[in-house]
């Protein structure tokens, strides 16, 4: 019940295309859902985050879509660029528990 | 602005040797601090977290330990390294009284031979 399942494991997208990464969870107590971007040899950097009270959040080319009833959330990268090539992690947490549950990551490659 | 530092950046150690990795945060007071391990091609595993000086919570039983001797300093240690301790170690912080956004450091690549 504490797992966050992330898919796909890897993704190849053409430049200018849309990258979509999905995550699913079981624990309805989760109330914070961040996405992190990690380049090789670097620490993860917060990309965008959402709470269950909204269904969508957009920051530039990055959008989180949240489906509370389905217990799923996804990251959409519009107009994907080669510089977006990285590993993306979703996570879920319960406020006050000091603990993130991370997905297993998606390695994105955007072809020039 | 807040900055998080980790050192060393890379480390190669023989099996059975001790370990000490250091993490410091600048620009904030009383942060929550975290140690994660990331195995090659895997997700992030929370090892320890701390909500204050001397307060350490362990998430996974192992031969690693953590200490917080100062407010913004977090140390990961081992008395005797195992081959399975190899990985990418990440320190992170979040604001006091908040468990939401965690900010990660640059990481330490540890190879145990």
Image (cartoon, rainbow, N blue to C red):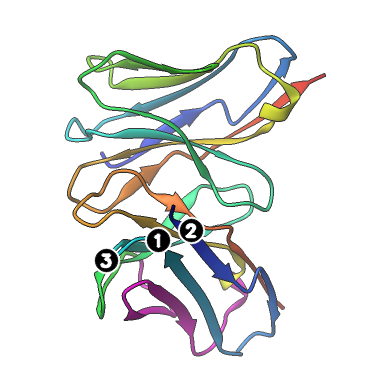
* Coordinates of residue A41 in the picture (x, y in percent): 68, 53
Residue occupying image coordinates x 30% and y 62%: B31
Chain-order first, disc 3 or disc 2: 2
Residue, disc 1: B27
| Vertical position of residue A91 compared to residue A82: above or below | below
Tell which subunit mark 2 falls on.
B
* Viewer-proximal residue among A23 and B25: B25
Tell which subunit mark 1 falls on.
B
Residue occupying image coordinates x 63% and y 53%: B40
Q: CA distance from mark 2 to mark 1?
A: 7 Å
Tell which subunit mark 3 falls on.
B
Q: Are marks 2 and 1 in contact (CB under 8 Å)?
A: yes
Chain-order first, disc 2 or disc 1: 2
* Coordinates of residue B36 in the picture (x, y in percent): 45, 60
How would you rate the neighbour count of disc 1 (Cα within 10 Å): few for under 14, some for 14-19, many for 20 or more? few
Secondary structure under tag 2 reads strand
Residue, disc 3: B30
| Vertical position of residue B6 compared to residue B46: above or below | below
* Viewer-proximal residue among B82 and B6: B6
Secondary structure under tag 1 reads loop
Residue occupying image coordinates x 34% and y 61%: B28
Q: Which residues are magenta?
A: B60-84
Q: Where does the C terminus of chain A fall, quadrant-wise?
A: top right
Residue, disc 2: B3
Q: On the same chain: label 3 and label 2?
A: yes
> On residue B13, which mark appears?
none
Question: Which quadrant holds residue A79?
Answer: top right
Residue occupying image coordinates x 58% and y 12%: A78
The answer to whether residue B12 is left or right of residue B20 is right
How would you rate the neighbour count of disc 2 (Cα within 10 Å): few for under 14, some for 14-19, many for 20 or more? few
């Amino acid at each position: 019940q504490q797992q966050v399942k992330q898919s796909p494991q890897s993704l190849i997208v053409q430049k200018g295309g849309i990258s979509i990464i999905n995550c699913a969870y079981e624990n309805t107590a989760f109330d914070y859902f961040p996405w992190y971007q990690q380049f090789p040899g670097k620490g993860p950097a917060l990309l965008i985050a959402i709470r269950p009270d909204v269904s969508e959040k957009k920051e530039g080319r990055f959008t989180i879509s949240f489906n509370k009833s389905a217990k799923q959330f996804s990251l959409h990268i519009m107009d994907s660029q080669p510089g977006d090539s990285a590993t993306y992690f979703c996570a879920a947490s319960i406020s006050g528990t000091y603990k993130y549950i991370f997905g297993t990551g998606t390695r994105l490659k955007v072809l020039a | 602005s807040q900055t998080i530092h980790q050192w060393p950046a890379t480390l190669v150690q023989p099996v059975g040797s001790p370990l000490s990795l250091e993490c410091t945060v600048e620009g904030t007071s009383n942060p929550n601090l975290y140690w994660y391990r990331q195995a090659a091609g895997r997700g992030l595993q929370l090892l320890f977290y701390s909500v204050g000086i001397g307060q350490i919570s362990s998430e996974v039983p192992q031969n690693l330990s953590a200490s917080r001797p100062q407010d913004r300093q977090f140390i990961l240690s081992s008395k005797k390294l195992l081959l399975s301790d190899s990985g990418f170690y990440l320190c992170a912080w979040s604001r006091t009284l908040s468990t939401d956004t965690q900010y990660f450091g640059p990481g330490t690549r540890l190879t145990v031979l």
